[in-house]
Amino acid sequence: MARNKSFTFQLVVMGGFIFFFYMFFALATSIYRDYKLESQIQRFEQDINELAEMAQQKPEDVMYFASKEYKDRYAKESLGLLNPGEKLLIIPDEEQVIERGPVELMTDKVSTSFVLEMSNRQQWWQYFFGQTLSIKLPAQDKVEEEVVEEEIITPEKIESIIDGDTTSGDDEVEG
């Protein structure tokens, strides 16, 4: 009988260890599942915050893209247009030939290094008050140039070009 009690005691202890390990395993997997779920919730909350921030930015973007400042910038950068009275400043590359003088004459040839050696203040002084610094690409083959009548671009024409309107601003009559 004593042997039977010790065997029963061993079975109870063994069952207790098995139950303990099962509970420990269940607890560990539950904690791991909760950790993964919590990290996924945090990731979703970050995504929601980013999307909400983007949604708040959209009306501001729409207002900016509809503004005259954007249309003017787009016309200048993408279409190469200028407002009336504006001048384009071109900074030459090393392989370009620079000519100095009034735009009509352009007789004095100046090297790029000469222009680059001038101080910034001198270059601006020459640009606004002195002779014009113009650049031309190195001569390839002389081709007969056609005289093209320049069209005056008004802000209304720029807006119509940006908006994709093909009609010109001359057709409109202001009342």
Image (cartoon, rainbow, N blue to C red):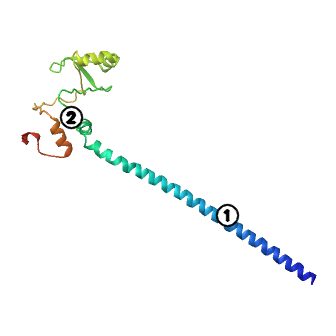
Q: Residue at x 37, y 51 (%)?
A: 55
Quadrant in the rendering for residue 137: top left
- State the residue in front, 173 or 84: 173
Q: Residue at x 23, y 36 (%)?
A: 72
Of badges 2 and 1, the one in the foreground is 1
In the image, residue 73 sits, relative to residue 163, either above or below, namely above
- State the residue in front, 175 or 162: 175
Amino acid on which the number 1 mark rests in the picture: Ala
Left or right relative to 3: residue 131: left
Residue 133 picture location, percent across and down: 24, 20
Q: Secondary structure at mark 1?
A: helix
Left or right relative to 14: residue 72: left
**Location of mark 1 (residue):** 28
In the image, residue 143 sits, relative to residue 173, either above or below, namely above
Quadrant in the rendering for residue 143: top left
**Location of mark 2 (residue):** 81
Residue 89 picture location, percent across and down: 26, 26
Rendered image: mark on residue 77: none
Q: Residue at x 29, y 42 (%)?
A: 64
Of marks 2 and 1, which one's residue comes earlier in the chain?
1
Contact? badges 2 and 1 (CB < 8 Å): no
Quadrant in the rendering for residue 14: bottom right
In the image, residue 144 sits, relative to residue 26, either above or below, namely above
